[in-house]
Image (tube, rainbow, N blue to C red):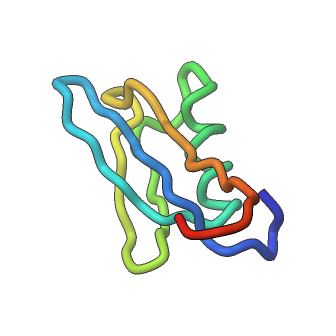
Amino acid sequence: MEASSKPRRVEIGFAGGLTLTLRLHEDAYNQLREGMGGEGGERLVEIESEDSRVQIDLAQVVYIRLEIERGGVGFY
């Protein structure tokens, strides 16, 4: 993602099967990914989405899914 790009859809999956879908800018997405990679880091991370602030318990996150923009012609 480019720093000036529009927010993209990110789905966060939690233990137990719940999901949370947010529209995040690149910096917020990177903050979330970096938090997932470290051991002994912060357990709670506050992410600012397009329309809200969300605190996420990283110990409960199972996956992060980033929407891929596809180029093309026609209707979607």
Q: Is residue 61 above or below residue 12?
A: above
Q: Is residue 3 above or below residue 64?
A: below
Side of 75 where 62 appears, left or right? left
- Marks counted in the figure total 0
- The part of the image, by quadrant, that contains residue 55 is bottom left
For the point 29% across and 32% down, the residue is 14
Q: Quadrant of the N terminus?
A: bottom right
Judging depth in this view, the residue of 32 and 70 nearest the camera is: 70
Which residue is outermost to the bottom? 51
Judging depth in this view, the residue of 3 and 57 nearest the camera is: 3
Q: Position of residue 38 (x, y in %)?
A: 62, 25
Judging depth in this view, the residue of 3 and 8 nearest the camera is: 8
For the point 49% across and 51% down, the residue is 10
- The part of the image, by quadrant, that contains residue 15 is top left
Q: Is residue 75 above or below residue 72?
A: below
For the point 74% across and 60% down, the residue is 72
Q: Position of residue 48 (x, y in %)?
A: 49, 68
For the point 67% across and 55% down, the residue is 69
Side of 52 where 14 appears, left or right? left
Which residue is outermost to the front? 74
- The part of the image, by quadrant, that contains residue 37 is top right
Q: Is residue 4 above or below residue 69?
A: below
